[in-house]
Image (cartoon, helix red, strand yellow):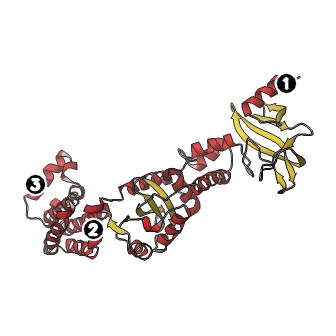
């Protein structure tokens, strides 16, 4: 007669024939539940490689898997897993329904790990489930790599590239994103021109066609520019407007810092000049109006900055003439930081002028970078670069796991 408790656990575990629950051991003092599985003598199995059926067990190997907790008690499955001697494939270990090969966790337990990994640091998960973090990382890496292996990039045409820091200092990871789908396609260590070639190789492995990439959006980092020009000579480069404006904002701030040495009214006004007028508080607006009535170099630099912002709203047929007028104004402003910024734009003229046509920016990557850095801060950093890249894919790769 079938033990009703064992039958209950068999149904709860979703066991497939010929496997069944043969014994259950529970220890309240150890907070542990052990469930023993087995199969009747003479049972037959399928070859895991070719699918041949009705093959008897050749031998078995005892295995143990951590399962989802039974209330507050840790649960473990025990089973002797059979190997079959297939006439075609040789000796192979059969597939089991509750765990993947070479894993010490059941599929449901791994599902719990993956769900938690999107929301909390791995060290916190390790403490919660009382497992070593390296075991958890192995699970995460397996599913991330498996999901990435199924990704198809054949329809991707617009790419954004930017760098993010793994930790304080110059320890960078370069991220490539599909700007239309807002997802990370590839992440790699470093920020050299060779990262572009690495992306192209990975892009091909996922069914992508490098020749179909029409646009690249990036900052003015020379390594990215040379890498794109060498590997994708036909792709249009658009320089990210946020980086262009940041460069000009930095120039405005240099003018302010120099001028405030003679005019103390400029102290503590940095954010007034960096923000757009519409984003200022009432107090900041009044301060700006007061300062604007004075003949300040900083105020002139600020007006030049606002004029450049206007360029990014123009249609393509008016953009170049406007930018030429702006360049003349900036280079004749007698404000050295502004002149230097204008000359930098001149050296990258075509890529800046591409914006009114492509309307591409790395705003997507800025948002992704914020998520990544928030996760990094929550985790207090990642022990290896591989872990960091794995987490980037998990957080921002939109993978089908």
Q: Do the CB atoms of the residues marked 1 and 3 lie less than 8 Å apart?
A: no
Which residue matches tag 2?
352
Mark 2: few, some, or many residues within 10 Å (few <14, many ≥20)?
many
Q: Quadrant of residue 325?
A: bottom left
Query: What is the distance, in whole Å, between disc 1 and disc 3 at their CAs?
Result: 87 Å
- Can you say whether 297 is above or below 127 in the image? below
Q: Position of residue 210 (x, y in %)?
A: 46, 67
Which callout, 1 or 3, points to the residue nearer the camera?
1
Mark 2 touching mark 1, by CB under 8 A? no
Residue 158 location, x and y as percent? Answer: 40, 60
Residue at 52% over, 70% down: 198
Specify which label sits upstream in the sequence, 2 or 3: 3
Residue drawn at x 69%, y 35% as measured from the top left: 69
State which tag comes first along the sequence, 1 or 3. Answer: 1
Q: Residue at x 81, y 41 (%)?
A: 78
Nearest the camera: 265 or 202? 202
Between 59 and 278, the one lying in front of the other is: 59
Q: Secondary structure at mark 3?
A: helix
Q: How many other residues sit within 10 Å of disc 3, few (<14), some (14-19) or many (≥20)?
A: few
Residue under pointer 1: 3
Task: Say left or right for 52 vs 334.
Answer: right
In the rendered structure, the answer to whether residue 179 lies left or right of residue 306 reads right
Q: Which residue matches tag 3? A: 290
Mark 2–mark 1 Cα distance, whole angstroms, equals 75 Å
Q: Position of residue 39 (x, y in %)?
A: 86, 38
Q: Quadrant of residue 245?
A: bottom left
Note whether residue 384 is visible. Answer: no
Disc 2 to disc 3, C-alpha distance:
34 Å
Asked if disc 2 and disc 3 are in contact, CB closer than 8 Å, the reply is no
**Residue 11, label in figure:** none
User: Residue 122 versus residue 266: which sits nearer the camera?
Assistant: 122
């Amino acid at each position: 007669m079938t033990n009703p408790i064992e039958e209950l656990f068999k149904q709860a575990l979703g066991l497939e024939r010929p496997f069944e629950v043969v014994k259950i051991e529970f220890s309240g003092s150890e907070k542990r539940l052990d469930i023993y599985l087995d199969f009747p003598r003479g049972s037959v199995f399928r070859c895991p490689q070719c699918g041949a059926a009705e093959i008897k067990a050749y031998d078995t190997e005892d295995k143990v898997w951590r399962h989802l907790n039974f209330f507050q008690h840790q649960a473990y499955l025990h089973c002797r897993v059979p190997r079959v001697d297939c006439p075609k494939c040789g000796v192979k270990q059969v597939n089991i329904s509750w765990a993947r090969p070479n894993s010490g966790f059941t599929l449901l337990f791994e599902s719990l790990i993956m769900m938690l990994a999107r929301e909390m640091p791995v060290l916190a998960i390790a403490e919660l489930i009382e497992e070593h973090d390296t075991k958890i990382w192995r699970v995460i890496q397996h599913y991330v790599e498996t999901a990435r292996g199924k990704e198809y990039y054949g329809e991707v045409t617009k790419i954004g590239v930017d760098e993010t820091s793994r930790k304080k200092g110059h320890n960078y990871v370069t991220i490539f994103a599909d700007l239309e789908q807002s997802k990370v396609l590839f992440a790699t260590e470093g920020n050299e021109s060779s990262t572009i070639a690495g992306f192209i190789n990975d892009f091909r492995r996922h069914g992508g066609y490098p020749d179909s990439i029409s646009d690249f959006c990036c900052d003015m980092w020379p390594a990215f520019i040379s890498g794109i020009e060498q590997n994708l000579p036909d792709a249009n480069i658009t320089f990210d407007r946020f980086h262009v404006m940041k460069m000009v904002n930095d120039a405005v701030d240099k003018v302010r810092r120099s001028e405030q040495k003679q005019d103390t009214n400029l102290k503590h006004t940095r954010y007034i000049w960096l923000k757009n007028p519409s984003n200022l508080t009432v107090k900041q607006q009044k301060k700006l109006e007061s300062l604007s009535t004075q003949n300040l170099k900083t105020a002139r630099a600020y007006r030049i900055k606002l004029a450049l912002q206007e360029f990014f709203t123009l249609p393509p047929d008016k953009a170049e003439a406007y930018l030429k007028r702006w360049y003349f104004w900036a280079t004749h402003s007698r404000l050295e930081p502004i002149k230097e910024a204008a000359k930098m734009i001149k050296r990258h003229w075509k890529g800046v002028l591409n914006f009114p046509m492509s309307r591409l920016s790395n705003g997507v990557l800025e948002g992704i970078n914020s998520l990544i850095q928030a996760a990094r801060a929550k985790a207090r950093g990642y022990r290896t670069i591989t872990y960091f890249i794995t987490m980037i894919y998990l957080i921002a790769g939109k993978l089908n796991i």
